[in-house]
Amino acid sequence: MNLSLFIARRIYSGKEVQKQVSKPAVRIAMIGIAIGLAVMIISVGVVIGFKNEIKSKVVGFGSHIQVSNFDSSLSYETRPVVTNDSIIKVLSSIPGIKHVQRYSTKPGMIKTNNAFQGMVLKGVGQEFDPTFFRKNLVEGEVPAFSDSASSNEVLISKSLANKLNLKLGDKIYTYYIQSEVRARRFTIKGIYQTNFSEYDNLFLLTDIRTVNHLNQWEPEQATGMELQITDYDQLDKVAYKVYQHVDKEVDKYGGVYYTQTIEQLNPSVFAWLSLLDMNVWVILILMVGVAGFTMISGLLIIILERTNMIGILKALGAKNFSIREIFLYFSVFLIGKGMFWGNVVGLTFCFVQSKFHLFKLEPETYYIDHVPVEFNFWLFLLINVGTFIASVLMLVGPSYLISKINPAKSIQFE
């Protein structure tokens, strides 16, 4: 059996440790490790959850990739491209593409007896995937949209409904300015709430036939196509494949296809999310530093307290390296115990918050009404392994203090 490990275990589990001066320092070191690891687990879980929540909202409104007209301006008053079965079949066959759906937009205005509000009418076809809006539905239902008949039904956000004092089943009048003002009446079929104000305050959802009619387009034309992919990490690769297949191709009406990812369409949002990664790195470095320095102080106190034992071991012929091993093993036991409680605290917080949403946020500011938490096993494992290795490596230097202890002088101390 390893003698250094045996002695370290005896020191760690010995009852006499309870009477040592180093006990408070040992506790502080373990608490430092536990708090540092818990903060790291919680921070990473919150940031991952927050980024994924915001991404899911942006993607829910605009999908992962959009293919539209190259000549379209940045406004929602767009020029169309042909979106017939042939082009949809081509896009659907690209590896990594999960779903393709058409969409058309038309900016306009909602007017009631007491107020008015600018908006964008977004039309979708029967292939529309309603999963995102059903998840965020608060009243009513998502209409069954069609491209062959006008339903005159819309899905409106709760924020718009509150601003205009509208409720489920109300009739609303919308107006669109072209060569002349055109009006259209809709019935509110459902109310959704995503808390993403940039889109909640903007979009009304209806069938694509209505929007195409307002735009005076042909039935096979639309603003563009939204493409969902199977793996977000492959976004750029899949977008490049789409670019190779359709970009710069000209349809029979002269429209030129143009591919953009959701990150290109919303650069400010994704730039903001990327800043969160820097915040996480700062927190990780600070917490590892705090945990490491508390362990260093604890180790130094333990070495000084065990000066007599070190002197005796040296007198018996023990090498400096073997004695250093004893205290490093002892430190590993303390680090392990601290990490255990850190994991308990961090994982308990993540579980409770994900289930009960105890900590709330202002949705007007953060686009979500609670602190989101998401568990990632591989990042969790990486944090634990990284914390353990960093803490042990930080103790190697201070352990060299043992080589400075003189056996003749240290044996005199009790």
Image (cartoon, grey):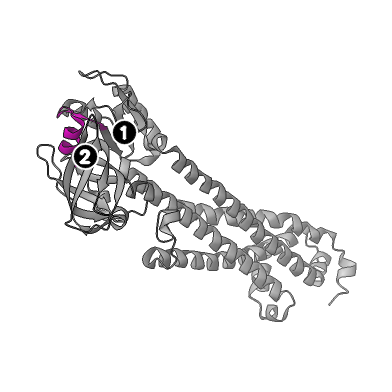
x and y, in percent, of residue 349 in the image: 46, 66
x and y, in percent, of residue 308 in the image: 82, 72
Q: Nearer the viewer, residue 297 or 85?
A: 85
Horizontally, residue 90 falls left or right of residue 1, namely: left
State the image quarter where residue 392 is shown.
bottom right
Q: Secondary structure at mark 1?
A: strand
x and y, in percent, of residue 123 in the image: 21, 39
Q: Quadrant of the N terminus?
A: bottom right
The reply to whether residue 326 is in sight is: no
Crowding at mark 2 (Cα within 10 Å: few <14, some 14-19, many 20+): many
Name the residue: 49% across, 41% down: 271
Residue occupied by mark 2: 123
Above/below status of 224 relative to 42: above
The kind of residue tagged 2 is Gly
Residue occupied by mark 1: 66
State the image quarter where residue 20 is shown.
bottom right
Question: For residue 316: magenta?
Answer: no
Boundaries of the magenta span: 207-224
Crowding at mark 1 (Cα within 10 Å: few <14, some 14-19, many 20+): many
The residues bearing labels 2 and 1 have C-alpha atoms spaced at a distance of 15 Å
The kind of residue tagged 1 is Gln
The reply to whether residue 307 is in sight is: yes
Horizontally, residue 72 falls left or right of residue 39, namely: left
